[in-house]
Amino acid sequence: MNTVVCLKQVPDTETLIKINAEGTGIVTEGVKWVMSPYDEFAVEEALRQKEKAGAGSVTLVSLGPDRVIEAIRTALAMGADTAVHVNDPAFAAKADPYATATVLAAAIKDATYDAIFCGKQAMDDDAGQVASILGELLGLPVVTMVTKLEVSADKKTATVTREVEGGQAIIDVPLPAVLTAQKGLNEPRYASLPGIMKAKKKPVTVKTAADLGVSVEPMTIIKSMTLPPARQAGKKIEGDDSDAKAVALAKALHEEAKLI
């Protein structure tokens, strides 16, 4: 089974985020960058489908600056076969969901694939829009929040279980399709030492705006970005009388916290 996986490099979830001087983004220096966690589920599922079919390839596509090669090599070490790295300063300040999907579509449109996997959302902007826009641009059906996937023997259809509020939905979808991975779809593997060594030799094609023949303008522009206000210190209800403490707690929740 031939698949394409779109992945994004994001700041580590434990990174201390700082806003840049312009207030339009984050300070990128000194940040630890990793593959977006939901994209790990996408890579793993592509690998499992290839292994289940007994043949095929897994191609990675990622948009970003030079440092993105680290996330690409991580996915290659997991077992992906090849990668396309779209690296062009022309895209650097324009990579909102629409622009990103446009660039990814241009990089993917001539490829041969049975499915395109994405994480359900990136862990930095949490937009969750790229996969749906990508499917629209490529003329493909899209199923989001996938927690189980069964592909037919002829690879023409798939039965997909997706998470919905309060339950699950089971959908039959024609292939190729764009599928977004939710936690629970699988358990991503760790890269083995042999896999890490092999990843260094696997082909990574670098594409620029000129190579893809696209020029994009973002549909959204960040006007300002601020950190959330600092959390206020908690209040401890003192005393030995439990009834009095309960009354004091209820009064504090009503008058101070405005929660009841």
Image (tube, helix red, strand yellow):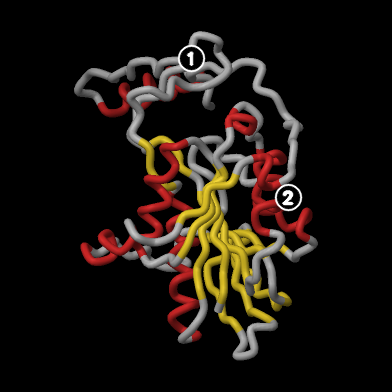
Question: Who's the residue at 23% across and 66% down the image?
Answer: 194
Q: Earlier in the sequence, mark 2 or mark 1?
A: 1
Q: Quick check: 13 above or below 5? A: above
The residue identified by callout 1 is 20
Question: What's under tag 1, amino acid-wise?
Answer: Asn
Where does the N terminus fall, quadrant-wise? bottom right
Image check: 39 left or right of 173?
left
The residue identified by callout 2 is 133
- The residue closer to the viewer here, 118 or 249, is 118
Question: Who's the residue at 70% across and 39% down the image?
Answer: 99
Q: Quick check: 83 above or below 125? A: below
Say which element carries label 1.
loop
Query: From this viewpoint, which residue is outermost toward the bottom?
Result: 153
Residue 260 coordinates in the image, percent (x, y) = 53, 27
Q: Local crowd at mark 2 within 10 Å, few (<14), some, or many (≥20)?
A: many
Question: What's under tag 2, amino acid-wise?
Answer: Ile
In this orientation, does residue 119 appear?
no
Residue 257 coordinates in the image, percent (x, y) = 48, 19
Q: Which quadrant of the structure image shows residue 3?
A: bottom right
Q: Local crowd at mark 1 within 10 Å, few (<14), some, or many (≥20)?
A: few
Question: Who's the residue at 61% across and 41% down the image?
Answer: 208
Question: Who's the residue at 65% across and 53% down the image?
Answer: 107
In this orientation, does residue 149 appear?
yes
Residue 51 coordinates in the image, percent (x, y) = 43, 80
